Amino acid sequence: MMNEDFKRSSFSLPPGYAVEHDPDDLWGDSRVIVNIGPTHPAMHGALRMIAQLNGETIEKSYCEFGFTHRAKEKLGENRTYHNYIVYTDRLNYCSALINNVAYAMAVERLMGIEVPERCVWLRMICCELSRIMDHLICIGINAVDLGAFSFFLYGFHQREEAYTLIEKLCGARLTTSYTRIGGLMADAPDGFERELKAWVGRTRKVVQEMDELLTGNKIWHLRTVGVGVFNKENCFEYSYSGPNARAAGVDMDLRRDQPYLFYKNVEFDVPICQNGDVFDRYMVRLLEIQQSLNILSQCADKMKKGPIWAEDKRVRIPDKDVVYNTMEGMIHHFKFFMKGFEVPPGEAYTQVEAANGELGFYIVSKGGSHAHRMRIRGPSVWHYQGLSKMVEGEKIQDMVAALGSINVIAGELDR
Amino acid sequence: MDIRKPISSQGGDSILKFLDLWKKQASVLKQKFGVAIEEIRMPLDDLTDVPIVYVQKDSIISILKFLKEDSEFEYRFLADITATDEESEPRFELVYNLFSHQNRCRIRVKVRVRESDAVATAVSVWEGANWAEREVYDMFGIRFDGHPDLRRILMDHRWVGYPLRKDYPLRGYQMFVDSEPVNLSLLEQDK
Amino acid sequence: MSKDGSSAYLTTKLDVLINWGRKNSLWPLPFGTSCCGIEMMATLCSDYDMSRFGAEVVRFSPRQSDLLIVAGIINLKMAPILKTVYDQMSDPKYVMSFGACASSGGIFNVYSVLQGIDTLIPVDVYVPGCPPAPEGVLHALMRLQEMIAQGQTQSQKKRIEMKKGIS
């Protein structure tokens, strides 16, 4: 044990210096404080962790973030509801479409707008497409961190193909801004369902290959099984949701528990693992990709032609034809984009099952075209909070595996 | 046309599905805690999606604990802790969003807080409330009594003012020339 | 060429040779903080493949790299760290400002965001877009290579001026 005087003097040393040898402590000479991040290859985005190491074992650590804070909640109070759509892209940028859908749903709920069927189906396709993309990048990067580079390239190529599909929907790759309040930016092009199904078929094969490449791999097992365990009880304490919670055996999926869109009308399973280690989190994501592919092909079958805009004059963006050719259309267009539309007073917390877990928009409206409070509940904050506990007593290299597996996205973490 | 219209594709039909349950829970809460419950706003009567339970500041922890641990309520999932700036006395409303795995419904607990007040921390109920409360402190300046580590979380620790208060300007830049040092005292403290 | 080896002709040619080597072996340091980091990954990955331009050796240590790609938002908490990383890189060093946030703050004109990294460090090429498409990044890289060949980058220009000051 260290005595009190010694403790004080040693901890005033700058970080990175070894603590001087204490005769009573066998490991004292190898106790080091390491600063990891904010720019570090192992930290995804700008995250920072300060760990006290005993040999290679993390004894105690704490995490810091806020290095990409962009004041999105404050902007929510200063932008009109329509203008705010672009800011929702930049929350979880790996799956921007889910954020768009969640935000549009939240505002529509406050206004009591029901969108037509085709729009809902398209939104569901958006959600599942980006869920697959998010999972691909999560397990891919997790594998890269542990040395399996080719696995990542398989996933990323499929992601590029998904980008092509999304470009067909909205013309953008990453930051989509596809939804509008009460509708969508544009209808899907002709033959989109066919292309989607072809993509689903190809992806199914690729995921199968990825599964064969890594799931039975001995090295992968050694690096992931039993590493970064976060059990069920901890998941409840730290409000884990989504795949990270399901990996620990928490039977919770908002698509099934609090159905939104048309998730009631499609069939899918909710994969659940028991151990809550890095391997289980990888497995849940891999299985979820397959379920999402099933949902996608069901959506492509069930989607029918029809309008994509709600019949509501408050939110309907005037057609370009009307804007360019009539005076009233022009005035309407100008007023819509300069002043924004009024949202009736009320407050709602609208949640969706995003790729990482529960994504919620808590909007308080007091009337007018700006929100009184725009709160974004991103799952990453809660997941990142558990990291210190998760890696306590683990080896330093396992921290990299654990961090990659909980998929912390800086944009959603810092908002 | 507002929040009271239940639309199933937005999850809005939960208003109809859970209304009876919520009414029952509201009467139980009123009976058990009496004056500690200031008011309960129910959906359809008020402009909200789930019941809002306004509680007195001093009894917030006991009510949260009851909501979490009682087998009928079982609001075990802390979805969010946040606050709103109301610009009138009492200035802030502290908001707890809860979800029940068992009943699959939500509830919202609110506390009215003055600028000078401190609220008891919920870390004793949920360990994970730690960072959410730090964020509320960082953004609104609401202090939490008994919090293990009440520091700024998103902003630099030298930042002056609380960005999400309504009187903080959107473009109130504050520049620092050096980065935040490692806080060794956090590693020193015993668990 | 005179006997002491101080001929202008030979040194110029040597510069050209060195710059040719420099432009074809860029070692980027990816300072990816947010959304643009994902597009940077796409550029480095198989479909776009930045290694065709001799810039695939990604190094996370500022001591080993000479091209700083600032991809994404730099906020006021991050700004001192970016400055430190830039200072740690050895000359000649080049900076690519990747995306609207790094170039000008983009749509985030708010209390926490640095309004363009050029207020802090010299920038050679700016890539517009939020986030830029990989094609745009490759274009910027080729433009940077041209600049290096001509000795037009900020750090090369500074070096020439320093030399002038000494002589």
Image (spheres, coloured by chain):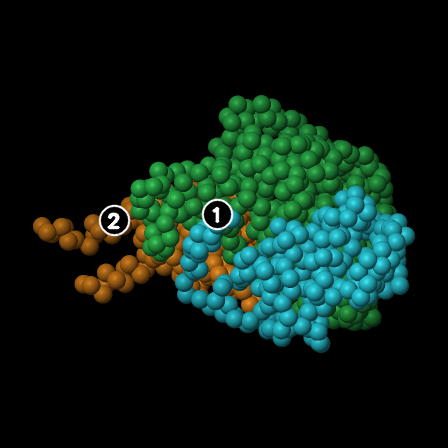
Chain colours: A green, B cyan, C orange
The x and y percentages for residue C95 are 42, 55
Q: Which mark is residue A292?
A: none
**Lateral position of residue A32 relative to residue A358, left or right:** left
Q: Name the spot of residue A47 as percent of width and height, x first.
A: 51, 50
| Residue C71 horizontal/vertical position (percent) | 50, 52
Q: Which of B63 and A54 is in front in this view?
A: B63
Tell which residue pokes out farthest to the left in this image.
Answer: C3
Kind of residue sitting beneath label 2: Lys
- Identify the residue at image location x=75%, y=59%: B109
The residue carrying pointer 1 sits among few (fewer than 14), some (14 to 19) or many (20 or more) residues within 10 Å by Cα, namely many
- Tag 2–tag 1 contact (CB < 8 Å): no
Label 2 crowd bin: few (<14), some (14–19), many (20+), radius 10 Å: few
Indicate the chain on which mark 1 is placed.
Answer: A
Of residue A154 and residue A277, the one placed in the foreground of this image is: A277
Q: In this view, does A107 lie to the left or right of B44?
A: left
Residue A61, numbered circle: 1
A67 vs A184, nearest the viewer:
A67
Q: Tell whether A398 sits left or right of A329.
A: left
Quadrant of residue A316 within the rendered picture: bottom right
Q: Which chain carries label 2?
A: C
The residue sitting at 65% across, 46% down in the picture is A237
Secondary element type, mark 2: helix
Residue at 65 percent of width and 36 percent of height:
A248
Residue at figure coordinates x 73%, y 50% from the top left: B68
Q: Quadrant of residue B80?
A: bottom right
On screen, B28 above or below A117? below
Residue mark closest to the camera, 2 vs 1:
1
Q: Mark 2 points at which residue?
A: C13
| Among the 4 quarters of the image, the one containing residue B33 | bottom right
